[in-house]
Amino acid sequence: MLNPVYSHHITSKKNNGRPQVLNMTQKVALIPYLYIYIFLYQNMCRTLKANAATVNEKAPLGEVLKETISANVSEDSVVLEFAQRDGYITQVIDFKQELEILKVIVLGEEELGQNAYQVMCFVTRFLRGDFISADAMSKLRQKNPGTVRTPEEDRGTEDFDLDLSVDVTTASSLSSHIPRLCGEASTATYASDRDLKLWTQQRTDIDTDWSSISEVTNHLPTRGVARCSDGGRDLNSSCACRYQACIAWYPCGLKYCKGKDKDSGKNVSYRCGIRTCRKCRNFSYFVSQRQLCLWDE
């Protein structure tokens, strides 16, 4: 079984001290090597002991993606990850802290002189009813692993305005997963002021208060910042970027069936499967250069 991955490094040869730029053919060819690297990385590193399942999911555009979901009961967390056409997505659900961390790797645009790839992390509040527990996930046994899965429920798209940057090196007060997962996104890890305030107000069992959160976050410019998608903007000018991340298939709840107890004859309910969902998220956040948001057109 595969353990969850906390860091993915895409390397390229150096050219006069600058990363080599990849063309589209090279980008597509790179994706299979991501899988190879992840497999080797997981076996080399001492990561979390976890139960993992590999699922073939059908994405909105019709392509089939291979998704790995790992559960770690001792840390009360679940990791979901998959490669897509332009990079890689890792979603960590921290049930203990009731936070979700989404790490996105995006391959660069060769014709516009971008680096080989860029990494972003998005930290949001998590509601327990949105994903099955780590304990339930660890007990799942997949039938017909080669089957292409489609979700039973589409939960639509949720919008997030992220006006905070997160200091990754000190963010363990939010979640211990952030420093491990987002080390490569030290200047591109984002959260919402409103979201985290709600999080602190609703949590009575955490050691973190708003003053400690303020120490690991900084406010980003929001007023008067134009959208990166506005035409005619200079590539070096700052703007508000939007990135959409979609999880095409994930276990969002348990199914219960009714039956009779063999000994007592009484009616009982028991777990008999999972409910599966699809959900997208639109993240809006400040970038110092439009070149860091070329997909938002």
Image (cartoon, rainbow, N blue to C red):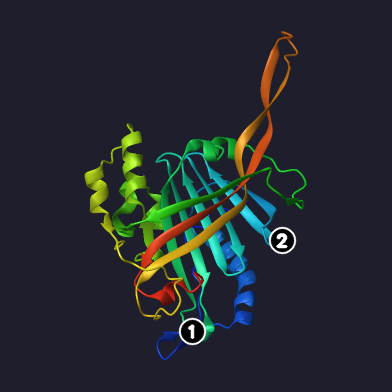
Q: Position of residue 273 (x, y in %)?
A: 69, 34
- Disc 1 target residue: 112
Relative image position of residue 138 (x, y in whole percent):
59, 40
Whether residue 20 is visible: no
Which residue is drawn at the image coordinates 44% and 72% (left, top)? 230
| Residue 265 horizontal side relative to residue 168, left or right | right
Q: Residue at x 52, y 79 (%)?
A: 109
> The disc labelled 2 sits on which kind of residue?
Gly
The total number of labels drawn is 2
Question: Which residue lies most toward the top here?
Answer: 264
Structural crowding at the residue carrying mark 2, measured as other residues with C-alpha within 10 Å and reported as few (<14), some (14–19) or many (≥20): few
Q: Is residue 238 visible?
A: yes
Which amino acid is tagged 1?
A: Leu
Query: Dot 1: few (<14), some (14–19), or many (≥20) neighbours within 10 Å?
Result: few
| Residue 4 shown left or right of residue 99 in the figure | right
CB within 8 Å, label 2 to label 1: no
Task: Label 2: state its secondary structure.
Answer: loop
Q: Secondary structure at mark 1?
A: helix
- In front: 35, or 283? 283
Q: Which mark is residue 188?
A: none
Viewed as shown, does residue 42 lie left or right of 165?
right
Vertical relation: 201 (above or below) 239: above
| Quadrant of res 25 | bottom right
Q: Which residue is found at the position 39% from the left and 41% from the top?
A: 97
Residue at image mark 2: 62
Q: Position of residue 237 (x, y in %)?
A: 35, 77
- Left or right, residue 199 beside residue 59: left
- Give how far across and how far down residue 153 sits, in percent: 65, 43
Eyeballing the image, is 212 above or below 46?
Answer: above
Q: CA distance from mark 2 to mark 1?
A: 28 Å
* Corner quadrant of residue 181: bottom left
Return the disc, 2 or 1, that comes first in the chain's sequence. 2
